[in-house]
Amino acid sequence: MAYSEKVIDHYENPRNVGSFDKNDPSVVTGMVGAPACGDVMKLQLRIDDNGIIEDAKFKTYGCGSAIASSSLVTEWVKGKTVAEALAIKNTDIAEELALPPVKIHCSILAEDAIKAALEEYKTKQSK
Ligand code: FES
């Protein structure tokens, strides 16, 4: 199956790979897995006191589309508010990367990772 140029670009030059210190109080982590293929994605966000996402990092053990999707969302979420980041849809990711139907679940993983990280943010806020 042919990957789109954007997928190949993100796959070969992934943005923001790595992780933050999870003990940093401004860091939240979203860890999700795709049952269909066993791929795993970890997305970390550093969120400032005003609810702005300052920085993002990811580690993905998965296919090229999953790596590209997570790389892309680290770029997209930076500078966004929590509400804006929650509005990112897997269909936006799939469209940007021109993912074929069999790779849609890879973009869903990236949306789920954002949601999981921001779920932790809400839990932290309510404490
Ligand atoms: Fe499962 Fe891409 S094949 S995340």
Image (spheres, grey):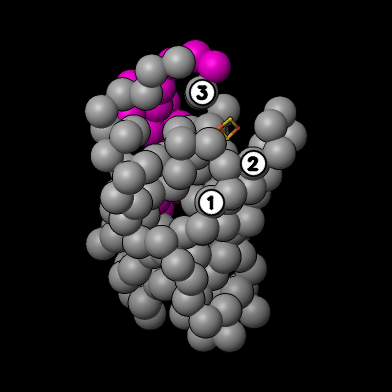
Q: Are marks 2 and 3 in contact (CB under 8 Å)?
A: no
Indicate whether 103 appears above or below 18: above
Q: Are marks 1 and 3 in contact (CB under 8 Å)?
A: no
Give residue 47's quadrant in the image.
Answer: bottom left
Dominant SS in magenta: helix
Residue 125 spot, x, y in % from top left: 56, 74
Secondary structure at numbered mark 3: helix
Task: List the single residue furthest toward the right.
Answer: 35
Q: Kindly identify which residue carries mark 2.
A: 39
Q: Kindly identify which residue carries mark 1.
A: 60
- The quadrant where ligand 1 appears is top right
Q: Is residue 92 visible?
A: no
Q: Is residue 35 visible?
A: yes
Q: Is mark 2 within 8 Å of ligand 1?
A: yes
The amino acid on which the numbered mark 3 sits, given as a three-letter code, is Lys
Q: Kindly identify which residue carries mark 3.
A: 103
User: Quarter of the image containing the N terminus?
Assistant: top left
